[in-house]
Amino acid sequence: MFASMATITRLTDSCIYVATDSAATLFDPGFHSFLSGQIDLDSIGEVTTVAITHEHGDHVHPDFVRWLVDRGDDVAVHSNQAVADLLAPHDIEVSVDAPTGFSVEDVVHGKIPNGSQPPNRAFTIDGVFTHPGDSRDPSNSAPVLALPIIVPWDTAIGAVEFARRLGPSQVVPIHDFYMSESGRSWSRDLVRGILADDGIEVLDLDWGDNATV
């Protein structure tokens, strides 16, 4: 059964909290949200599922994952095998199966300057929200798409083209930690103006903001 409603809360960078009728999921618990002090971690609601797209530290910080697991009851961590191997020395169990109510698509990370492209898993939850991680390769999206904007592996042009190809109704800009608040606002406004012609709404979510969709 698909959820009819979801509340999406943006922490920092690519870390997103999504609460639906059936699950409370934290995507990509990276070091920015855990260590920067920009977010009150105690304000994070109940988490039933932690979904991690890939192994880079801005998307998975072992201490953050441990904190999430220890503060909840039966918190399940899901990712690919590379992340499972990364977290195993920290005694964190990771399932490589898709969580109940999710679909996944295994692609590769956008090519970074050193030429590497680690495995990347895109998650879609309850048919309402898709987190692609750091990749433009996913082939489909739920009505709401997390859209990486300012990245070392692509351009804003690539972000716009990716959104147009997948055709969501709304996007949540992500991957912009190293910009100032005014820079993040400017980048959202830029993409909003362009995608409006395609009928795609850019949700104006900065750190700690939320929207119900």
Image (cartoon, rainbow, N blue to C red):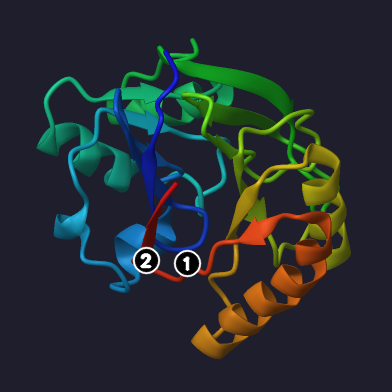
Q: Quadrant of residue 118?
A: top right
- Identity, as a three-letter code, of the amino acid under mark 2: Asp
- Taking 31 as reference, is 116 above or below it? above
Residue depicted at 51% across the width and 29% down the height: 83
Residue lying farthest to the bottom in this orientation: 182
- Taking 192 as reference, is 27 above or below it? above
- Identity, as a three-letter code, of the amino acid under mark 1: Leu
Q: Quadrant of residue 190?
A: bottom right
> Camera-side residue: 206 or 68?
206
Residue at label 1? 205
Residue at label 2? 209
Name the side, left or right, on which 147 lies relative to 24. right
Residue depicted at 32% across the width and 28% down the height: 49
Q: Secondary structure at mark 1?
A: loop
| Residue 151 coordinates in the image, percent (x, y) | 72, 62
Q: Secondary structure at mark 2?
A: loop
Distance from Cα at disc 2 to Cα at disc 1: 5 Å
| Residue 11 coordinates in the image, percent (x, y) | 38, 60
- Mark yes or no: residue 77 visible: yes
- Callout 2: few (<14), some (14-19), or many (20+) C-alpha neighbours within 10 Å? few
Q: Quadrant of the N terminus?
A: top left
- Taking 48 as reference, is 144 above or below it? below
> Camera-side residue: 203 or 100?
203
Residue depicted at 81% across the width and 69% down the height: 194
Q: Which mark is residue 40?
A: none
Residue depicted at 76% across the width and 74% down the height: 193
Name the side, left or right, on which 31 lies relative to 135. left
- Mark yes or no: residue 113 visible: no
Q: Are marks 2 and 1 in contact (CB under 8 Å)?
A: yes
- Taking 118 as reference, is 42 above or below it? below
| Residue 97 coordinates in the image, percent (x, y) | 49, 10
Q: Quadrant of residue 107?
A: top right
